[in-house]
Every structure is written in structure tokens, then in C-alpha cells.
Amino acid sequence: MYIGGTGKPGLHHLLWEVVDNAVDEATNGYASQIDVVLHKDGKSITVSDNGRGIPVDIHPTKKIPTIEVILTTLHAGGKFDSSNYITSGGLHGVGASVVNALSESLIATVKRDGAIWEQRYERGKPVTKLKKISSSSRGSGTTMFFRPDADIFETVEFDPETIAENLETKTYLNGSLRIAFKNEVTGEKHDYHHEGGIEEYLAHKLTEAKARPVHPDPFVLRQEGMHDGARVEVTLQWTEAPRETLHSFVNGIPTSDGGTHEQGLKDAIRSAIRSYLDTHDLLPKKLEISADDIREGVFGIINLFMVDPQFQGQTKEKLNNPETKSIVSGAIRLELEQFLNRHPSTGEAIATRVIQAARARHASRAAANSVRRKSNVSHRLNLPGKLADCASTSPDECELFIVEGDSAGGSAKQGRDRATQAILPLRGKVLNAEQATLKKVMDNKELSNVVQAVGCGVGEALDISKLRYHKIILLMDADSDGHHISTLLLTFLYRYMRPLIEEGYVFIAQPPLFRMDSGKQTFWALDEADREKITAEIRKKNKNAKIEMQRFKGLGEMMPQTLKDTTLDPEKRRLLQVSIPTDERLLTETTISQLMGKDASARFDFIMNNVDEVHNLDV
């Protein structure tokens, strides 16, 4: 009932109750240092703090020492008196007595008023009276040694890593607090102190998750004087991660199941971002933004301090106070919106991230629906009729060349290695997946052929383990039309099959545009710049060298052997691997949206801004 079970989580919950009592002293300004020792047996722990020390005077009604009342009676903790604690993690007041009841041995030592007191317990019952063991002591504080009852718990072996992680989190949430952890089992010692507070904690979580932020500076809010004396600390940062990650706490206690404070944070994020998008007219027409799109990739930490938190169960995993939702949302929403307006580059980066998430969601849903519709028709693998497949069935050695036109496809089929190289000819320029409706994209014959040939599905239904080729190579003419077709295919792959790019399976072939013969030597030039470079090298060796030059109008003009030697043969060819640099993901999204989208003004601006860089125009 009180610790959630007798397994490992319940065992460690005993420690959290004792530590949280010490942290409460620090949170309310009475302590600055906590020491935790895991003893050599791995089954007993001592927690010490330099707080005020549990009272040892005689209880006015029970007529026994107050410390004994606290350690043996449910709901007798001093935290029910708000004059003792403004905010407290163990507000149920049963923590210490539950730890005592579930321990085969507990020793409480108190320093206060210049003396040291000690009392021993077994399974919740005192076995000694409270004794003064020293009359001369400096400072104050409480020390608790306890060994959980092996007859109750499935195991009494504590996990040092779990303890260390939890203790360090406490210091992130209380910037002035130091916690020392000594593991006598291994001899390791740790000293945790994080003055940066939740901002430092957020940076730690981002590093731990390897999540790259889309904006440099996090949103940070510390607000006091809220309803009934509550105060809140919040920090947020959007990243490229595929889902939201929120860590919520109440009075320093982790609420793993969230609650009304976390819901208030989510509401604030949704309202503030929607308002910012609407105010600055950043939403593309007909694109619906959901709350999940807004929160995708966000890392957030909220630590709420309040006087009377009502938790769902003694384990305090979910906050239930109904009024907290609106209080937290109201405190955060306006501040977040003002932050975005004061930092326009951050606001635009977050807006782009949200739009990216919405587009990906719409594309994935439509693709998945299309796959589900078609899956009822046939469960066998339907390969496109024009696909000349390879003999091998090992994806590691198989390559798929997506070729422009039947003519080039014919040369490629004759010049390929039939064992490992498959050829799929496409007819002309494929559909622009960025401008077309989702239905048109999924109904398009050429793009459908690509999906069927690759074999791993699209959108949410994409299963990379079913990929039939580990090299998907776009083989187009080395001219503007070829580049355009490559761009259209890349746009489709980026929108609907992005894991293929992210896993490094997509390549662009580099067929030559020119053949250059000088004497007995033959050179292949990719473009005009490469041709000039080769010409200069030939002239450097022989100024009067005769150079015969042939410009290919397209791949269809090449003899199969020529295409093999220049473009298909793994020993001689040049391939360009397609990737999305981690620091340019937002730029990639923006570029595709602007240059391939329906809004022509973005393309016009791009052309006008880059016209001076164009030296050879292929009309």
C-alpha cells in the first residue's frame, strides 16, 4: 500500500522516503549536505543530513519521545504542521514509520541542542529507550541506519546505479544541495552538486539521450507567489528527437505517472505555440497541427513546490490536485509566448520543427492507410513488371538502380551484374510528392513501383528489416532534367521513406557527361568543371595534345559496356551517398518545403538571390 510492492522498486522506495525527509530539510533552508552510505553487505544503508534533527523532547500527549512517535505511528510526522515545512516531499507523514516497520533493524541518531541521541528499533518496535550518547556535540542533524526485512522483500540487495541516479537528480532539483554517496561494496565515492539546477539537468538529459536541440537557448521559468504559496520551476527545449520527453516533480519527488501539473505544462505548451504560429502566420494552408505535433521532440522538466499536494497513492507517482492544472498552465503559457516573441530565431526554429512533425504525421498516416488497403488484396510480394531483379536474395550485396527511361534502362540491364544489380526504369519525371495530395502520391504508378521494388513499405508501416537492397542508387542523365528527376525522387524518399536516407542506403550515381580521348587514353568528365580540369591536366603534360570530345545527351546513348565501366562497376564508378547532416536537419526541411512546395515565391527569391552564381544555363 505504501511502497508499491515488495520487489526492487518497493525496496528502494524505503531509501527514497528517508532521503526525501533529508531533502525536505534542504528545500526549506535547514540543511545543505546529505551523506548516503551503502554498507559492505549491500543490504543496509545509512542516510545522514545536517538539518535541525528530529525532535527528541517528550511528546505532549503520547508522553514518549517525539522521535519515537514519528518512527512508530502513522501520520505523526511533523510535516502536517505547515510551520515546520512549507513544502515537503513526504507530506503523507507515514514515510519514516513505514521504513521502520519494514526494516529488521533501524538505528536513529539525532544531533541537536549540543547533544547526541540514539534509539534502536527492530521491525518497527523500539528495542532500546532513547539514550543520550554524548553531551558535547557541534551542529545538528539526523542519521538513519536501516536494514530492510528479508522476510518481507523478494530481495534486499540494493542497486548502486539506481541509488546514484536518484541522488544526483535530487541535486539537480536543489541547486544548493550537496549529496555524497559512498558504496562500500566497491569502494566508489560520488559527490553530487549541481548549482545550475534544472537547466543543468536538462542539458544532462539531452546529452544522455543524444538529442540534438533545434534552438540554442532553453526556455527557463522560475515563478513564485502562485496560488496558496506554490512556486514552479520549468525548462523546455525542442530537439530533433522523434517524441516528447517530460520529467515532472512535486517538491523534488519524481512523478513518473505525471498528473495535473504535467497536464498544465502540456496545455501551456500547446496554447503558447499555437498562438505564436497564428500571430506570425507561419502555418501552411490546409496543414492541421495537433498537440502531439507541437510537443514532438520537446524535452521538458517541471518541478512544482506546493503546500498540500494530493498524490495518487503513497508512492507519489501522480499528482491529483485538480486546481493545479490551471494554475501551472496560466503561469507558463504567457511567459513561453513572450519568450518566443523575444527570441524570433528560436520561435521560427520551433515553428519549423512543429510543421515538420505535422507533415511527417500526415504523410505516414496516409502511407500506412494505403498499405493497409492494399494488404487485403494480396499477401505475396508483387514486384513491378519493368523491374529486372538480381539473382541474389541477400540485401547486403544487392543494389537497385532506379533509371531514367526505358532506353537507359535497356543499356543498364545489359551492362549490369545480374547476380547483385537490379534495374528499375521509370517513365519521365515522377510526381512532386511535396505539392501533390497524399492520395495522388500513393496512387502514382512510378512511385508505387519504387515502393514495391524496395519492399519495406512506407510511412508508419516502413520496416527497414524488410529492405530488399542495401544500395538504392538513383541513376539519371547528367543534365538538368536528370538532376530534376533525382530531386523529385529524393523529395519522395525524404517525405515517405526517410529511414532509408538516415540509414545510409540511398546513393546518387555519377555518370559522365563527357568522354575525352587523348592519344590512347580515355577520360570521363562528370560536368563542365570536371572537363576543364581534365583538359588542363592533359595540356600540362602536352601543350599540343589533341583532345577528342563527346558529349552524351543521355544514358541511352551509352553502349552497355561504357555504362558498366563508368557507372555500374563498383570498382570504377563514383557514387554520392545521400545523408542529412545532424546540424542541418532544419535547413533540409526548410529547403525542401520552400523549393518543392506550392508557394512559388520562395523559389523566385532563391533564383534571384543565386542568379549571380549561374555561369552555364542549360535551357
Image: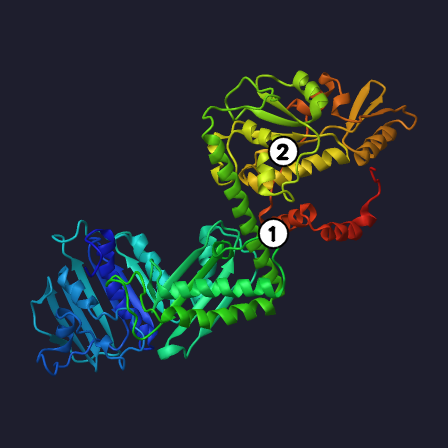
Give the residue at x 81% y 36%.
529
Q: Label 2, on which residue?
A: 507
Give the crowd class for mark 2: few <14, some 14-19, many >=20 residues within 10 Å.
Answer: some
Dot label at residue 18 = none
Front one among 2 and 310 = 310
Q: 525 above or below 212?
A: above
The three-letter code of the residue at mark 1 reads Leu
Front one among 359 and 32 = 359
Instruction: State which tag comes first along the sequence, 1 or 2.
Output: 2
Q: In which quadrant of the rendered view does residue 321 lie?
A: bottom left
Q: Position of residue 177 (x, y in %)?
A: 36, 70
Q: Say which element carries label 2.
A: strand
Q: Position of residue 598 (x, y in %)?
A: 68, 48
The three-letter code of the residue at mark 2 reads Phe
**Relative horizontal placement of residue 449, taking residue 310 as reference (left or right):** right
Q: Quadrant of the C terminus?
A: top right
Q: In which quadrant of the rendered view does residue 417 lie?
A: top right
Dot label at residue 586 = 1
Q: Is residue 463 visible?
A: no
Give the residue at x 85% y 28%.
538
